[in-house]
């Protein structure tokens, strides 16, 4: 049979398959999320996220050293305070849990790049991401609190801040606050396209951030919407975002593709707690090859257009890259 074009020619040899690979995955694009709980001497397993831990600021270096040894270049810190109140005072406290953790981390493991999640849900007694006015999140009243929180993180040593609250105008408020304080070189990675998702469940247990009433659909995005995501990303870039993020990742690969092509800044994606927990549960039940599925899912995110992947599998992915299972 005459057949001039045979795509299989480029697949039969493993070396050639690697040579012509369209999507390449590097450890340089991985970010590992970590939970820091206020207190001392804490290293505890997270039941909802098998294999993940909560650290206190004084023990955090134990986990950070593992990240650095794996070759993962960056971490994203989430704080869990002892005290919560209606005005989220722990979020911007110079001696808050994230601020303590940053000062220790930068001293003990300086080779890592430190990104901090800027939100208020972990710090408010009601569990919402902003200030309340008659049980409704007041967008504009929340902006100065977010800006003050971001500044406190940078003053404590954060290399980058990542607002995840989904308040309108928060990127501009943070950019102005940082610039006025002289931190013009600190980048902002906005959770620009953050959907109201059922995939966040394990994280909310891990961070103790579930809302005390209602839900977050009034400020996080409706997962039916695609064009709105492009609008959000473009607005954040116009306000000064240096990178934008799509969250979650697995069910939103089309959005990652759209956003990465629509804006002229790097695009990150967050493979969230529910995605991680599902793979873990299926692997523990003996239904899948955990490494193979986790690698395939990660490649899908990069293939869709992300340059950065925030994932609880970051350390394992780094090892699988070294082993040649992904790359």
Image (cartoon, rainbow, N blue to C red):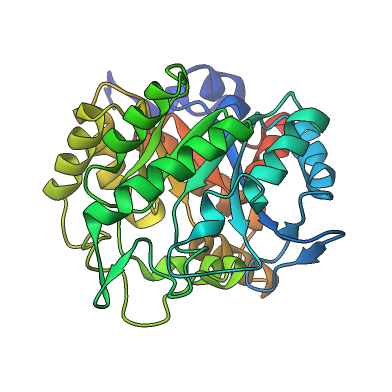
Q: How many marks?
A: 0
Q: Quadrant of the C terminus?
A: top right
At 14% from the left and 49% from the top, the residue drawn is 228
- Foreground pick, 106 / 220: 106
109 relative to 203 in the view: left or right: right
At 54% from the left and 41% from the top, the residue drawn is 116
Q: Residue furthest bottom?
A: 213
- Foreground pick, 37 / 227: 37
Q: Quadrant of the N terminus?
A: top left
Can residue 315 be seen in this snapshot? no
- Where is residue 190? Give x, y as percent: 36, 39
Q: Is residue 75 above or below residue 56?
A: above
Q: Residue furthest right?
A: 41
Can residue 198 be seen in this snapshot? yes
- Where is residue 247? Give x, y as percent: 38, 51
At 63% from the left and 62% from the top, the residue drawn is 81
- Where is residue 182? Give x, y as percent: 45, 18
- Where is residue 158? Give x, y as percent: 58, 32
Q: Quadrant of residue 26?
A: top right
230 relative to 5 in the view: left or right: left
- Foreground pick, 172 / 233: 172
Q: Is residue 141 above or below residue 170?
A: below
Q: Quadrant of residue 51?
A: bottom right
């Amino acid at each position: 049979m005459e057949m001039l074009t045979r795509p299989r020619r480029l697949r039969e040899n493993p070396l050639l398959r690697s040579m012509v690979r369209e999507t390449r995955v590097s450890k340089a694009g991985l970010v590992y999320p970590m939970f820091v709980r206020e207190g001392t001497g804490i290293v505890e397993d997270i039941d909802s996220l098998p294999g993940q831990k909560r650290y206190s600021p004084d023990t955090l270096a134990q986990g950070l050293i593992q990240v650095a040894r794996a070759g993962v270049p960056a971490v994203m810190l989430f704080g869990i305070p002892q005290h919560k109140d209606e005005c989220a005072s722990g979020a911007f406290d110079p001696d808050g849990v994230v601020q303590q953790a940053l000062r220790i981390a930068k001293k003990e493991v300086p080779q890592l790049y430190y990104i901090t999640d800027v939100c208020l849900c972990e710090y408010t007694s009601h569990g919402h991401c902003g200030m309340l006015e008659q049980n409704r999140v007041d967008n504009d009243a929340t902006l100065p609190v977010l800006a003050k929180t971001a500044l406190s993180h940078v003053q404590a040593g954060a290399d980058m801040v990542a607002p995840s609250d989904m308040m309108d105008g928060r990127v501009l408020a943070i950019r102005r606050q940082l610039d006025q304080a002289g931190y013009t070189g600190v980048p902002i990675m906005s959770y620009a396209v953050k959907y109201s998702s059922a995939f966040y469940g394990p994280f909310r247990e891990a961070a103790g951030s579930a809302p005390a009433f209602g839900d977050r659909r009034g400020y996080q995005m409706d997962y039916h919407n695609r064009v709105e995501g492009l609008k959000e990303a473009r607005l954040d870039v116009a306000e000064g975002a240096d990178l934008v993020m799509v969250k979650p990742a697995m069910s939103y690969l089309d959005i990652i593709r759209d956003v990465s092509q629509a804006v002229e800044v790097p695009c990150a994606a967050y493979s969230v707690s529910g995605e991680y927990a599902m793979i873990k549960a299926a692997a523990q039940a003996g239904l899948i090859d955990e490494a193979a599925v986790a690698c395939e899912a990660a490649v899908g995110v990069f293939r869709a257009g992300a340059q950065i992947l925030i994932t609880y599998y970051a350390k394992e992915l780094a090892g699988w890259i070294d082993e040649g299972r992904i790359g």
